[in-house]
């Protein structure tokens, strides 16, 4: 019999930075670099696996604490991973979610253990010669569809030359952005990050997108920038136009009030972000669709548990994304492929990343007709490029950014940029 036993002998935790365009959202604007952390787990037998997560200071410090606790762990034990991460964190304070204030309240243990779960699955796959999707129950689709993720954006970071995408600050600019993204990637669903301009301007943008792309499902996500009343008004105006409306307003109670007044399904990656949030949301009928995200739901296997709960209570599943690199795209693709309930095209910030900046060779992750084929090589199917990792780590050291701060960056250019919620 093949020996598949493996104990963790070493864990490295490396923060990296990659260039990011000036994408606008309700809390501000993306800074010139997005921060991530790459973890590499190596077994006593010399097999290594990789994972990727947020890059903020507090999160990084927690990852390092957890990493030290994992040496000696059996790579097959999810329960020991949970126990060791919990022990490493002790009674830690909340925060460190790496999402610039847009998602709070996710479980710290789940966030910290997530990249290690991915790395352990990568190792397990290599040990048994099977792709990660097989370890998650098997792929139910050969390729995973992703959605075009539109952002209002400036033409350039202040003081820099215009980037390749140019500005998108009105309906025509967004239609042009969507057209290019669809032409290049083949996406067949479209999401607009809203909460940036007054709701009537964003309604006009959705109408322009509907007219330009008649058959494509459309989603709008203002990251809880609206009151219940505004949300109900927007939902009424866009009745029948949206596939779902994502986080129009804050909190389970607010979302329940909106959900009760519109036939448009509501989705969330803000008010249901941990297992503790599920019961109240189900009880209040606050959301129809949960955007899973293995980075804050505890990794790929914990997302499988989320999917079982969604099955039980009839919740739809979609997938959330932040700015990310290829390790996460591979992990998201394996997970989505092995989650029958996940029937919506997943979010991804991928088109906003420059193709020449990554820590893995991204060839296995090419988009065809808006989808990424599930990698079939053992493990995640992507390998760490150590030179590229060193380059992006150097960029992290040099760029000076240590925590995502969309609001602070915006206020350098618009000192009176508002932070009150709801904004409209
Ligand atoms: O990258 C952004 O600006 C997004 O707004 C992101 O931070 C959100 O977490 C996300 O995409 C969402 O769906 O809420
Ligand atoms: Mg969202």
Image (tube, rainbow, N blue to C red):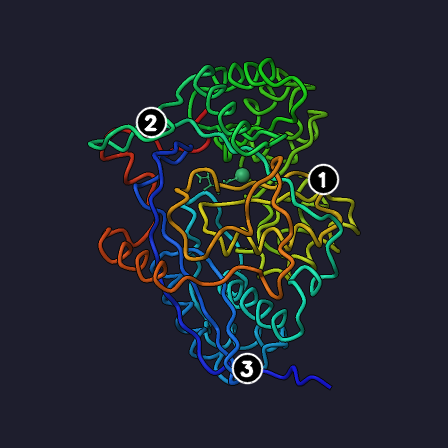
Instruction: Please tell me whether mark 1 or mark 3 is closer to you in this view.
Output: 3
How far apart in space, not on screen, are marks 1 and 3 (Cα)? 40 Å
Q: What residue does disc 1 label? A: 285
Number of other residues with Cα within 10 Å of mark 3, as a class: few under 14, some 14 to 19, many 20 or more: some
Quadrant assignment, res 330: bottom right
Real-space CA distance between mark 2 and mark 1, rounded to the nearest whole angstrom: 38 Å
Residue 34 image point, x, y percent: 36, 47
The foreground one among 161 and 265 is: 161
Quarter of the image for the N terminus: give it. bottom right
Residue at 66% from the left image edge and 20% from the top image edge: 241
Q: Which residue is mark 3?
A: 73
Q: Of 58 and 21, which appears nearest the observer?
A: 21
Asked where in the image residue 385 lies, by quadrant, the reply is bottom left
Tag 2 residue: 154
Which quarter of the picture shows residue 411? top left
Report helix, strand or loop for mark 2. loop
């Amino acid at each position: 019999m093949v020996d598949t036993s493996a104990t963790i002998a070493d864990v490295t935790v490396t923060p990296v930075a990659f260039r990011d365009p000036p994408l606008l959202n309700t809390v501000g604007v993306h800074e010139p670099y997005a921060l991530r952390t790459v973890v590499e787990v190596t077994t006593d037998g010399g097999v290594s696996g990789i994972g990727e997560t947020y890059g903020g200071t507090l999160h990084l410090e927690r990852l390092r604490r957890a990493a030290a606790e994992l040496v000696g762990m059996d790579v097959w034990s999810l329960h020991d991973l949970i126990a060791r991460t919990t022990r490493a964190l002790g009674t830690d304070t909340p925060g460190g979610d790496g999402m610039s204030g847009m998602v709070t309240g996710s479980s710290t243990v789940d966030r910290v253990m997530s990249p290690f779960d991915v790395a352990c699955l990568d190792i397990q796959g290599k040990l048994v010669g099977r792709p990660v999707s097989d370890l998650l129950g098997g792929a139910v689709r050969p390729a995973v569809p992703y959605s075009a993720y539109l952002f209002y954006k400036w033409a350039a970071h202040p003081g820099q030359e215009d980037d390749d995408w140019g500005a998108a600050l009105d309906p025509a600019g967004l239609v042009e952005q969507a057209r290019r993204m669809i032409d290049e990637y083949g996406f067949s669903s479209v999401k607009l990050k809203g909460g940036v301009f007054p709701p009537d301007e964003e309604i006009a943008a959705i109408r322009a997108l509907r007219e330009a792309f008649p058959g494509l499902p459309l989603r709008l996500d203002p990251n809880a920038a609206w009151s219940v009343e505004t949300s109900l008004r927007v939902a009424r105006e866009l009745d029948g136009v949206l596939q779902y409306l994502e986080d129009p307003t804050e909190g389970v109670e607010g979302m329940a009030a909106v959900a009760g007044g519109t036939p448009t399904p509501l989705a969330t990656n803000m008010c249901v972000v941990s297992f503790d949030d599920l019961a109240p949301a189900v009880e209040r009928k606050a959301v129809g669709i949960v955007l899973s995200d293995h980075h804050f739901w505890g990794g790929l296997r914990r997302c499988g548990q989320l999917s079982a709960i969604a099955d039980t209570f009839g919740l739809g599943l979609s997938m959330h994304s932040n700015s990310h690199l290829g390790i996460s795209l591979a992990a998201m693709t394996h997970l989505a492929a092995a989650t029958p309930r996940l029937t919506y095209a997943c979010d991804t910030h991928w088109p906003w990343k420059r193709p020449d900046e990554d820590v893995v060779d991204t060839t296995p992750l090419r988009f065809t007709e808006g989808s990424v084929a599930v990698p079939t090589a053992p493990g995640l199917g992507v390998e760490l490029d150590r030179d590229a990792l060193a380059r992006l780590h150097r960029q992290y050291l040099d760029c000076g950014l240590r925590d995502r701060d969309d609001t602070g960056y915006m206020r350098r250019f618009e000192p009176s940029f508002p932070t009150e919620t709801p904004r409209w």
